[in-house]
Image (cartoon, rainbow, N blue to C red):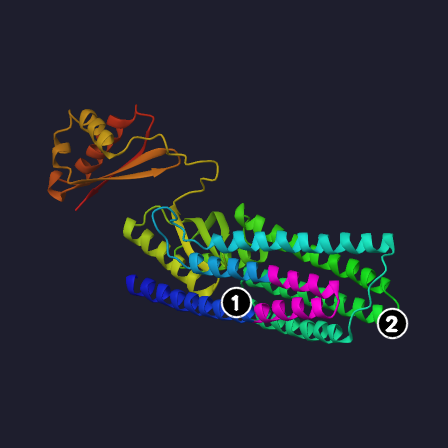
Amino acid sequence: GDDMSAELHSTLDTASDGRYQASRRVTFVSIVWNLILTVVQILIGIVGNSQALVADGIHTFSDLATDFMVLYALKHGKKSADAEHPYGHARIETAVTMILGIILFAVGAGIAINAGIRLSTAQVFVIPAAMTLWIAVITLFAKEGLYRYTMVIAKRYDSNMLRANAWHHRSDALSSLIVAAGIGGSLLGFGYLDAVAAIIVALMVAKVGVNLAWQSLRELIDTGLSTQDLGAIRRTILAVDGVQALHLLRTRRVGGQALVDVHIIVDDRLSVSEGHQISETARARLMREHAGIADVLVHIDIEEDIQGPACVDLPLRDEVLARLTRYFQDIPEARAIEHTLLHYRNGRIDIELLLPLDTVADTAAARRLVARFVEAVRADREFGKVDVRFH
């Protein structure tokens, strides 16, 4: 069991390292390109007399800020669990995804509002230099390339944060398209085309921002996995030998992975160690067969207790044995009891007594002794059946 668990954790750590390195690499590529594009757009925009290109350069500069946020989240989200964060730090990634989603929404709304103002005021554009159009087109292709590269890594490692950053690149590509259309329209005398394209594209960007922020919010408030995923998890658990049924299956997401806890029902006559073995097998299979599951907590039950444990108020061993000693004080054979097994089921305690075979002379004496034990506890409503075994 320990070897299997260590192997699973080693595999998970390796996958986690691969995810971290790939995410870090794609973010550094993004930072380099954003730095180059910011400088070129602002300089050429000023020299070439294009306010739109200067604004796009400032927009690209905002991407640098989000890139550094992503790097921060990658570094801190990778930290292993500690005393303050027993479930790890992966939710830092979720929080950053949410912030990126809000920024996307704000950028989209800002572009739409500005474009609407330009349309309503019928602003006359200063004719920009032709080289600004080339810079806008180059920026458009560079940003679309960054979007596609980042999205490939995001899908490979199922990272919502990288998806958010990829869409930030596409929002820049779309704004560069708007700039290109605006500059081209200005050169041709159709300045209003810039504003119309801006509104359409800005609403698309804002919608992506809302979707990403909403998805992250759902994770932060512990929304569970899909019905389809739950069904697959349920089938895996029920296929484990010894599992009779399951209930209270609960899941939640932490970063790119999920945590699961479940109650499984086993035969009430099993030993503690066999019940534990069944639970560990269920846990290991879930983590092996479902790649997105980081950890599983399995609770062993012997009956349905969805409404709450039926035996929760019953006394524990010390009190039970004290009562039995009192009830059995007039039965001399009770001093020969070697072991007392307690079975908590259906709201009562069933008792199993183990005695040496030489305690009784014959079968008839054994029956009389069992009857005396049963009669001795009959008045106690917290006790159920009494079984006596001779060996």
User: Would you place residue 173 above or below residue 245 in this image?
Assistant: below
Q: Which residues are magenta?
A: 33-62
The residue at the point 41 percent across, 34 percent down is 310
Image-quadrant location for residue 301: top left
- Residue 224 point in image, percent of width and height: 54, 50
**Number of the front mark, 2 or 1:** 2
Magenta includes 365?
Answer: no
Q: Amino acid at mark 1?
A: Thr
The amino acid sitting under disc 2 is: Leu
On the picture, is 160 further left or further right than 172? left
Q: Is 216 located above or below residue 2 in the figure? A: above
The answer to whether any part of residue 226 appears in the image is: no
Q: Quadrant of the N terminus?
A: bottom left
Residue identifier under label 1: 27
Residue linked to disc 2: 188
| Closer-to-camera residue (384/298) | 298
Residue drawn at 58 percent across, 48 percent down:
217
Coordinates of residue 309 in the picture (x, y in percent): 41, 36
